[in-house]
Amino acid sequence: MTQPDTQRPVALVTGVGRTVGIGAGIARRLAASGWDIAFTYWTAYDERMDWGVQSGATVEITKELTELGATAVPIEADLVDPVAPERIFAAAEERLGNVTALVMCHCESVDSGILDTTIESFDRHFAVNARATWLLIREYGRRFTGAPGTGRIIALTSDHTVNNLPYGASKGALDRITLAAAHELSHLGVSANVINPGPIDTGWMNDGIRAAGIRETPLGRLGTPEDTANLVDFLCSPRGQWINGQLLMSNGGFA
């Protein structure tokens, strides 16, 4: 949405570590629609994933958002740390003011199944995907001062649990926490929704996964970060206010 006045609303987007990621796509779309953006990233996560660290990504994303008219504030934070959400909001508010939209794209995602998941991995997944989601929403609820009807909480989820047990299970917990906020934070006049974007290739797919994703999607292609960003942009606009407490499939009909 294009804001009618000079005061741009503030969106906090978590999990914006790479230019090709869903989080970066959402940040760009919101910046183009008139939002200032605080975004989080955690380099240590990318370091241990197959895709590795994208050198200069934070600088590049900040530059892109600035060119779209936004004031952009990058915040590095390990969401395993239960103090991180409070620190993130404090940093965002210090530079940009009160946060109107909280969009959670962060995740811990390391493949393992019922028989080979370690206790350490299980706990880390729940710390990042479930506990941090709760703490971010709690911090948002404590600090939100916007007019009723303006606030937005959005989280990204997944239903992939087979051979991806800790990721899928912790995302299921994320769903319930976020949807509860639609009711528990109703006194603030904010909406809370969850989006399942389906398979989106942001660098983690091999040729077999990519081909299967295309084959199982009626529209004949994989989703893109922009597809998810368009829905987030709509939900954050005044036109999206009445959609609340929903788990939305935005996956091209992926089976």
Image (cartoon, rainbow, N blue to C red):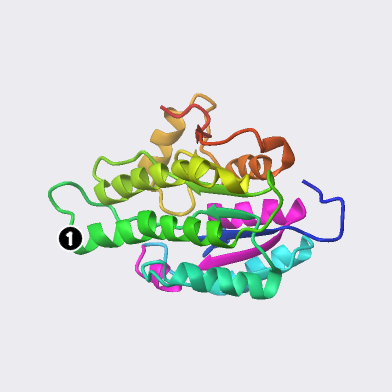
Q: Is residue 252 inside the magenta stretch?
A: no
- Judge whether residue 12 can be spotted in this image: yes
Return the residue found at the far top.
Answer: 218
Q: Which residue is mark 1?
A: 119
- Disc 1 residue type (three-letter): Ile
The front one of 141 and 216 is 141
Return the residue found at the far front.
Answer: 187
Q: Residues within 10 Å of mark 1 (few under 14, many from 20)?
A: few
* Residue 11 in picture, x, y percent from top left: 64, 58
* Residue 14 in picture, x, y percent from top left: 52, 60
- Judge whether residue 76 can be spotted in this image: no
- In the image, taking residue 57 as reference, residue 255 lies left or right, namely left
- In the image, taking residue 180 as reference, residue 112 lies left or right, namely left
Q: Which residues are magenta?
A: 21-49
* Residue 21 in picture, x, y percent from top left: 53, 55
- In the image, taking residue 218 as reference, residue 51 lies left or right, namely left
Residue at horizontal 42%, vertical 55%? 134
Residue at horizontal 51%, vertical 74%? 87
Return the residue found at the far right.
Answer: 5
Q: Is residue 33 inside the magenta stretch?
A: yes
The quadrant the C terminus occupies is top left
Name above or below for residue 42 compared with residue 149. below
Q: Quadrant of residue 52?
A: bottom left
* Residue 240 in picture, x, y percent from top left: 67, 37
The front one of 4 and 163 is 4
Name above or below for residue 208 compared with residue 43. above
- In the image, taking residue 108 as reference, residue 24 lies left or right, namely right
Residue at horizontal 49%, vertical 55%? 137
Residue at horizontal 68%, vertical 46%? 148
The front one of 208 and 191 is 191
Regarding mark 1 in the picture, which secondary structure is present there? helix
